[in-house]
Amino acid sequence: MQTRPPNMILSLASVFMKIFLRDRQAIFFSLFFPIIFMLVFGLLNSDEAEPIKIGIANNSSSDISEQFIQMLSNNPLFAVNVGDEVTLRERLVEGDVTMVLVVPEFFEATESGSELTVLVDAAQVQQLGLVMPVLDQVLLGIERQLRNTQPMFSLTLVDVKARSQRYLDFLIPGLLAFTLMQVAIAGSGFNIVEYRRKGILKRLFVTPVRPRDFISGIVLSRMVLCLMQLSVLLAVAVLVLDVAIVGSYLSLFGVIILGCFIFLCLGFMLGSLAKTQQSIMALGNLVIFPQIFLSGVFYPVSSLPAFIQPIASVLPLTFVTNALRDIANDGVSMLGTGWDLLGIIVWLLIAFVAATRLFVWKEVAA
Amino acid sequence: MQNSDKDTPVAVVEAKNLVKTYPKPGSKTEFFNAVDGVSLQIEAGEVYGILGPNGAGKTTTLEMLEGLTDIDFGDAYINGLNVNTNPFEVKKIIGVQLQANEYFDNLSLQELLRLFGELYGRRIDALELLGRVNLTEKADAKPANLSGGQKQRFSIACALVNDPIVLFLDEPTTGLDPQAKRSLWNLVRELNSSGMTIVLTTHNMEEAETLCRRITIMDHGKVIASDTPAMLIQQHAPEPPERPRHGSLEDVFLALTGHGLRE
């Protein structure tokens, strides 16, 4: 066996750290876009959730219809516009209101019941799931009042969250995961291709450095750099945009480290497969792009079309995003993320095996 | 280290019947031997030149000796160590300068030299090493800001961090102006005078003639002549009628490898 100082990996890592930190431009751009994203969404969604605009065309003149409209107007979830059906239909088509309720001429408390018509624009029905139960609830309330019955069950809502959840709170963990993926894949894969092109890998290969020491050095330094970059993002989110991190930072960074490792390994894998700068760009985008849209970075996976959800839910970035979100939004511990943590570990093993199989010094250097 | 005196002279680099096969360009089924049975005996302390037109197999031969390219057939020994079975041990005792001489951006010359030292598990005196290749004043410069000659001298400095027994130089003076070329020759002589064995490839006949104790001329992957420059000139240079022997090594080279232009 070759004798080598135990600090070989550390000293290589510190040299790579120096190399990476001096690449100011790369560091700037790795942070620039996520921060812009955060600021834009932070400013756009600085208010509490906007009420849903609904139109009500009241064709009835009964007390009950008045009461119904009154109850809806009192609900903070809705901004109610009362008008005639024709105008409201036009406004619905223009997108001014999300839906129009048509109260029929005969809207009375009778045994046969009265039917409400809900007009919606298919382009903006995503809020329907939210609205319908509330409508039901309001109607039920009126019904009980009229029949003078007491509800058998009642709900008392106690908010245990320190504050209400904004879109930004939802977005930040996704953005952390997304940045982590980008930085890690670029950091390992793109570097490897660049070093090959310059003949640096070949030059290193004629020294007795072991591939695992070389890779460990890069991985370690990239990991530290990645943690620094994400810390900056977190600091902006928490200090500037007042985003709440409910769970512990220890759990958060635990997941970040594991996620970083997955994508560094995937980067090495891609860097070993790609022979040119163009092909690493193409391969990198092939891995990065679908995950941006499918992994729940900007919106939950559950809002994707059903047929794509099974695929989306097993992507590595999905596990990382979910785990970070559970920790940041719901205060779950790292171990408490359960299946997501398991998914992360499985991907970690896959990526590690693939990277070490494919990164053959002699072939990659040639 | 392991040199015994059973053989005289001592071969510090020994290649026996080396073969390297590559697929023909543009074909997956046809193959050719880029190196086709090359044997070399390079003695300790000599400057040895490998000459040949482009594509003759010089670089591939060097890369096989350095452990950079797999040896398909045959054996290579550096200081008695089998390159195939002991690549890591071999790498510790050789210094290599490749044709490509780019390095990590953002590191200065002395930082790069220290990095190379680390790769051999050594702490080195970067400034002293830069002094040996006459680059002391460039210690804090980046490789990108060096001239061609300075880059080559720096590459040699990188190859010296482990005090190698054998130094391999692949076309060290290609593309250099005459001053830079001569300065590099002086460096090679200095290194050699301290006992270092140096193996170089070159297209420059004057370089081979003045620097090398012995040379090998390769063509089409085969060795076609090996001897001292003087002997080669005596044997192969065309003899002009009724005049004292004249001619240069370039005449020998062209006579042996033909006048046809190579890629």
Image: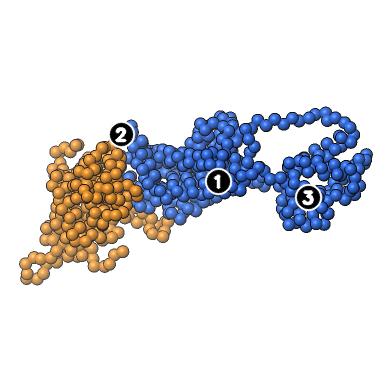
Q: Residue furthest right?
A: A111
- Measured Cα–Cα span from mark 1 to mark 3: 33 Å
The residue to which callout 1 is attached is: A38
Q: Image point 83% across, 30% down: which residue?
A: A151
Between A28 and B71, the residue placed more toward the observer is A28
- Measured Cα–Cα span from mark 2 to mark 1: 46 Å
User: Does residue A74 sit above or below A279 in this rendering?
Assistant: above
Residue A361 occupies quadrant: top left
Q: Is residue A364 left or right of residue A354?
A: left
Q: Amino acid at mark 2?
A: Arg
Residue A8 occupies quadrant: top left
Q: Where the N terminus of chain B falls, by quadrant?
A: top left
Q: Amino acid at mark 3?
A: Asn
* Chain designation of label 2: A
The residue to which callout 3 is attached is: A81
Chain colored blue: A
- Residue B145 screen position, x and y as percent: 29, 54
Chain colored orange: B
* Chain designation of label 1: A
Q: Mark 3 and mark 1 in contact (Cβ < 8 Å)?
A: no
Mark 2 vs mark 1: which is more N-terminal?
2
